[in-house]
Image (cartoon, grey):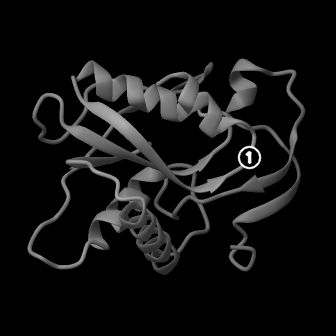
Amino acid sequence: LLGVGAVKFGAFSLKLHETNPDAPLSPIYIDLRTADNPRGGPLTPKIVQMIGRQLYGLAATLELRFARIAGVPNAGDPLAEAFASSVPSSGFRIPILKLGKTVTTKGRSIEGEVQGYWNPHDCVLLIDDLITGAHSKLEAVQALEKQRLQVRDVLVALDREQGGPQELERHE
């Protein structure tokens, strides 16, 4: 990740600054986006596949149970695709749901219709690139729950160790 420029050092504003502008700037920025992301990123398809395989291995080790997967837009979408393609070939492909994202002058939010096919109360595994304060993960969970879907687990490639998992637990 260092070699492709995904890790940067300096002073960076994060999503949490949209709701908490007085929070200290982050000395580290981790960009786990792909080149086709609207904001562009350094990850190659090979790196995305490696991350997807690692996330799939973690889900298998933890024995997570789910009927569908969804990536948190936009950085989580290619990781969800890579996760799905990492399933050992048995002729079964995990269905992927797509979440909508709105960008305004006030920030980004996950909202709108969920795209894909599901049954009411299906369990969805939510996948994203990283977690800081869990804001976008909670927005994604709410969007899925509005469609009568359940989210029991969230997998991320990187935990910034700034309270995100604990925030998710508080909202269970």
Is residue 82 left or right of 25 when viewed as pictured? left
Task: Tell me the residue at 75%/40% (across/down).
Answer: 162
Q: Provide the residue designation for mark 1.
A: 161
- Please name the amino acid that badge 1 sits on: Glu
Spot occupied by residue 158 in the image (x, y as percentages of width and height): 63, 56
Relative horizontal placement of residue 88, taking residue 155 as reference (left or right): left
User: Does residue 111 appear in the picture of this structure?
Assistant: no
**Residue at the (87%, 37%) spot, across then down:** 25
- Left or right position of 161 against 104: right
Quadrant of image for the N terminus? bottom right
Q: In this view, does 62 lie above or below 123?
A: below
Q: Could you say whether the residue bearing mark 1 is in a helix, strand or loop? A: loop
For the point 34% across and 35% down, the residue is 151
Location of residue 105 by image quarter: top right
Q: Can residue 7 be seen in this view?
A: yes
* x then y, percent, for residue 82: 36, 67
Location of residue 42 with respect to 3 vertically, above or below: above
Residue 66 position in % (x across, y down): 25, 48
Question: What residue do we see at 18% from left, 29% from top?
Answer: 121
Residue 132 found in image quarter: top right
In-image side of 128 versus 93 (left or right)? right
